[in-house]
Amino acid sequence: MSVIENGRRQLEQYSLENIYNANETGLFFRLGPDKTLASKSDTAKGCKRDKQRLTILFACNATGSCKLKPLVIGKSKRPRCLTNVNLNTLPVQYSSNAKAWMTGEKWKDWLKWFDQQCTEPTLLLADNCPAHVDSTELHLTNVKVHYLPPNTTFHSSLYLVILVLFIALKHIIRNCLCLNGLGKLIMVRQLHL
C-alpha cells in the first residue's frame, strides 16, 4: 500500500471539522525593510539586520471554522512588553526558550494542550520537522498525529489556510511596529484570530 493510499484511508475516518493541520513559522519582528524609497542621488546607508525572532505555531481545522490559539515562542520568559499583563488573557499562548525555536518538549506540551481541547477523535497533520518528535508515549486520548512525508506540506490545502493566517498576522505586526516606531512588540492585545 502506498503512502498516499494509507493517508487517504486515515482521512476518511474523520470529518473535516476534526482534521487539523499545525505548522510553525519564524517571524523576524524587528527586521526592517530590505528596500528604500531613496532616489539615486540620495545616499542610503545600510545597517545591520536585526535577527530578533519569534516562532509561531498555527493550527486550524480543514474547514477553517476552528482556528486554535497560536503558540508564540520567544526568547524571554517574561518580555518587558508583557510585564503587567496576565498571560492567560492573551489571544495567544506564550512560551520561551533560549533561541525562540520549537523544540521537542514544546511540541509535546502543545500536543497535550491540544488533546485537552478536543472532545472527539481528531486527526492532526504535521510536517516532518525535527522538533515534531514521536508522540506515542504521551498516550493522547482524542488526537492522532500523522506526520506528512518530506516535501509535501505545501501540497496540503490546510497549509494554505495557515498561510493566510500568517500573512494576516504579519501585516498586523508590521502596522503596529510602524505606528509605534520604537520597535516594541505592542500588537499582542490587537490580535483577534
Image (spheres, grey):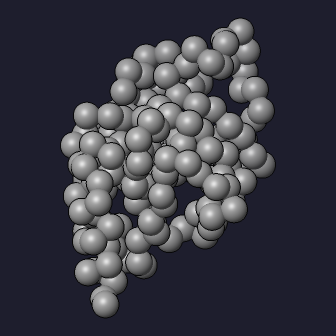
For the C terminus, the quadrant is: top left
Residue 123 x %, y %? 40, 55
Residue placed farthest to the top in the image?
84
Q: Is residue 175 above or below residue 119?
A: above
Say which quarter of the image contains residue 10.
Answer: bottom left
Q: Is residue 92 above or below residue 39?
A: above
Q: Is residue 59 visible?
A: yes
Say which quarter of the image contains residue 182.
Answer: top right
Residue 46 x %, y %? 52, 50
Asked whether, in this view, residue 47 is left or right of residue 84, the answer is left
Q: Is residue 78 above or below residue 17?
A: above
Q: Residue at x 43, y 17 (%)?
A: 190
Residue placed farthest to the bottom in the image?
1
Asked whether, in this view, residue 8 is left or right of residue 20, the answer is left
Residue 60 x %, y %? 35, 43
Q: Residue at x 36, y 35 (%)?
A: 67
Q: Residue at x 29, y 60 (%)?
A: 13
Residue 154 x %, y %? 30, 66
Q: Is residue 21 above or below residue 29?
A: below
In the image, 100 versus 174, the foreground residue is 100
Q: Residue at x 75, y 46 (%)?
A: 97
Q: Is residue 50 visible?
A: no
Query: How many discs mark residues in the rendered view?
Result: 0
Asked whether, in this view, residue 111 is left or right of residue 105, the answer is left
For the N terminus, the quadrant is: bottom left
